[in-house]
Amino acid sequence: MPQILAHASFPEKADRTLSTPVQEIATIAIRKLYKHYGTTSALRGIDLEVQQGELFGLIGPDGAGKTTAFNILGGVMEATAGNALILGLPARDARNYIGYLTQQFSLYPDLSVEENINYSAGLRLVPEDQIEARRTKYLTLMQLDRFRDRLAGRLSGGMRQKLALCCALISEPRVLLLDEPTTGVDTIARREFWDILASLTAQDITIVVATPDLDEAERCDRVALMYDGQIQQIGTPAQLKADLGLQRLVIRTSALFKTEQALLTLVQTGELADVSTLGDRIEVLTPDAQLGKKQVRDRLAQADLDCDRIQPEVATLENVFTTLLRRQGSVPQSLPFPRSPPESAITPASTIAIAARDLNRHFGNFHAVVDLNLDIHYGEVYGLLGANGAGKTTTIKMLCGLLPISSGTMAIAGETGDLRSPALRQRMGYMSQKFTLYDDLTILENLQFYSGVYGIPPRQQREKIRWVLAICGLEGQEHLLTRQLPGGWKQRVAFGASVMHEPEILFLDEPTSGVDVLARQQFWQLINDFARNGTAILVTTHYMNEAEQCNRMCFMVAGRKVAEGSASEIKAAQPGQLFELRVAQLQASYDRLRQHWEPWRVSIFGDRLHIVLDHSNQELPQVESLLQSANLPLLDTQSLPFSLEDAFIGEVQRAGGAPP
């Protein structure tokens, strides 16, 4: 079975134990930092300290000031006021000790893996007699040693990011600044990447990472929540969740929409803090779990609604972040879509909108999709999940009629004949993985163009374009060229363009890649609204917390479907058990266990280890014995439910792993 990460042993980091006191001198010290762009304040007096060997997360929505802070820390930009010290030096003077990964792809696509590293080594004045040893060390760590001669432009997203990290590490910096390093990277590669980061902190490398994925942020030692140029809260993930003062209830019911609408009245009265639908369940935030359960049951009884189960669960970091912003009135408002008068009744949910039988696609000798069978109903959100290269985009392109099939049959909206006909295309919407609007047109011109292509009447065009601009927060800026927009804002415009004509069937290929937490929530509110109005939606995503929003999903590995069902069904079907281990020496314990179990089974999450055991009665004593024999204290063991990410990685690895 392929390994997720080649085993590498590092000296144990002294301060990564649970009991070590905070160091007196911070590696990064920021005091009253301001940055103005004309009349715009990007940073408004932030204070921050990061200790040596700490994995520190910076999270916040687009425009919060994260990238500006990184540019100042990286010595790329001067602050307007305040101080940013790294290793006791002004940030600009400390650049020789810093590795910096920007959001943009910083490699040369026409150079090989090895040539990119050599070029970076030359820029950073790495002594020639040390380049080979360092290059081999980091290529081995990143599992890229077999791809030395491959052009960077031909690497997968995860491999590119690992190569960029090699280039940042070749000078052996003492501080790493990583600005959204895993955007567009699949789930397996992201877990690899974060395990690598934990290994690097074991060498006392200090890492500051920005991420739009709050599941990733759970793996940091501490995180800072940023909004509007200021740091709102700082703490460990556990501290922030404890300080939230809210508990989470998960409600299982078959009447999701009616239940959500009934419980929203309790949010309006202040009895509940929040209610949201996530795929096959409803989640509620309440100040008191027991009282909240009673309030929920009473309200559902009044509405003559049943629920199968109400289960308390631990709050998430995303709950913390969105609650903080909601209290400040910063969560985007949900705007109803201006629908045209229905020409006919909504198609029943029992009707199949997308059907595929034994679908295959070959590219020469490469089998991209293998005997795929799908049934997706009207009103359903269906997720295609898989690592990069699993066949998801190829599947969507075949179903859209953009790519011919090699064999098999398809039926789209009941049509089995000409699936490329203009009439059928008018009934579909498609948002591709790449931004498909025209960079040289303004936002308004793009929306007018797509309105015309889809045949929307002029009066409806104006109304729907206003809606797109409103949900994107771009009112008054519609004359900007689209190339001037950040990636996340472009994604919002592209989504709006793909749904203006009210498609019966909607294909969304990684629609929220690079989009911040608040915008992702807004995307999914809109997606669920279209589904409730009968649209069949097929979506791909690398964010597992997003995939929980799907009614059903399938996991794809090397073109084949290996699992299918709701998120709850897939997690419940996982063999074995997940355990969280609290250990005194994190990195050494991690290395020890990965020598005896398949590496994908062991991961670092903050200051804890997670391990998946198929036969816990026999294997858990082995874990204790292995650690004890190496003088590595095991302080506590706790059984945890599988997350969807755990389920996904387990299914993929058992099926043979992800393609390189």
Image: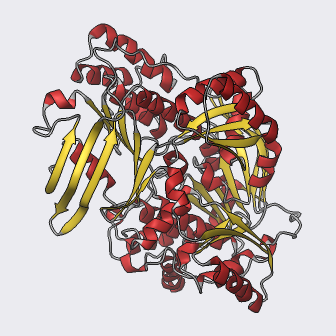
The structure residue drawn at horizontal position 21% and vertical position 55%, both measured from the top left corner, is: 359
Q: Is residue 570 above or below residue 634?
A: above
The structure residue drawn at horizontal position 30% and vertical position 58%, both measured from the top left corner, is: 391
The structure residue drawn at horizontal position 71% and vertical position 84%, both measured from the top left corner, is: 621
Q: Which is nearer the eye, 168 or 79?
A: 168
Q: Quadrant of the C terminus?
A: bottom left
Colour mode?
Answer: secondary structure
- Picture coordinates of residue 11, whole percent (x, y): 70, 82
Q: Which is nearer the eye, 519 or 437?
A: 519
Left or right: where 329 falls relative to 102: right
Q: Image quadrant of residue 633?
A: bottom right
Outermost top residue: 459
Outermost left residue: 417
The structure residue drawn at horizontal position 57% and vertical position 36%, both measured from the top left corner, is: 277
Q: Image quadrant of residue 66?
A: top right
Q: Is residue 35 above or below residue 497?
A: below
Count of numbered circles on the image: 0
- Picture coordinates of residue 511, whole percent (x, y): 42, 41
Left or right: where 451 falls relative to 67: left
Q: Can the viewer see residue 633?
A: yes
Q: Is residue 171 above or below residue 91?
A: below
Q: Image quadrant of residue 7?
A: bottom right
Q: Which is nearer the eye, 544 or 579?
A: 579
Q: Can the viewer see residue 236?
A: no
- Picture coordinates of residue 585, whole percent (x, y): 77, 77
Q: Quadrant of the N terminus?
A: bottom left
- Picture coordinates of residue 187, whole percent (x, y): 49, 59
Q: Is residue 627 above or below residue 389?
A: below
